[in-house]
Image: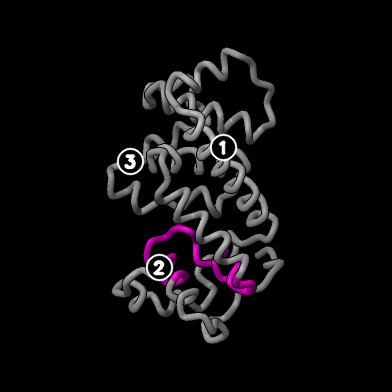
Amino acid sequence: MKKLRLQFICPEQVEDERIRDAILESVAKGTPRAESQAIRARLPHVFWSFQNTWNTVFVDGIVNHDLKELCRVYVSQSVECKYCGNQRSSKSSASGLAESKYRELLNFEKSDLYDDATKAALALTEAITWDLDTNDAFWNRLYEYFSEEEIIEIGYFVGFTMGQQRFNRLLNIHNHLGTTGFESMKKSASTHQPPH
């Protein structure tokens, strides 16, 4: 097993009850993963910066959540982050996002599983992930389906996701799933209410 490069905070070391609740919510929902949460929680300002972005941009925001979920997993698959690529948004699962749509992501342009708007968003995700050149046709395609504000949200979230997933991969987190100590508190996590 590859060594974990930064250590998790232990549950008993978390003094802020809201941070503990947020990590337990991650254990219960599966996203964001408890392991990366237990590393960020060592610095509360970093933890809340991530958590606030996750909630306000990914879970909520102005762009359809399922679309952002597909963009998130496209990044994971592209950078071969097994840690993030195997997790699924419980909100997307509840809305019925099919697993087949996750499997076709790296071949999205040729797939019949996505509508034109989804393909345009994935093209933006691909361009950001791989630093591709774009032209007027690329941008006209985006503007056909998305407002500038929606493009900003997708772009911001893709950049946020890409950086975090590359960092998680570097830390070897995927080799240490379920070892934070928060998992033993899962029973209480499944019945607790999310923090307000």
**Mark 1 or mark 3: which comes first in sequence?**
3
Q: Main secondary structure of the magenta part?
A: helix
Residue holding disc 3: 97
Q: Residue at x 53, y 16 (%)?
A: 140
Q: Nearer the viewer, mark 1 or mark 3?
A: 1
Between marks 3 and 2 in the image, the one whose residue lies nearer the viewer: 2
Give the mark toward the camera: 1 or 2. 1
Q: Amino acid at mark 1?
A: Gly
Pointer 3 or 2: first along the chain: 2
- In the rendered image, which residue does mark 1 sit on? 155
Which of 138/119 is in front?
138
Q: What is the span of residues highlighted in magenta in the rendered image?
A: 22-44
Cα distance in 3D space between marks 3 and 2: 21 Å
Q: Residues within 10 Å of mark 3 (few under 14, many from 20)?
A: some
Residue at 44% from the left image edge and 43% from the top image edge: 69
Q: Earlier in the sequence, mark 1 or mark 2?
A: 2
Image quadrant for the C terminus? bottom left
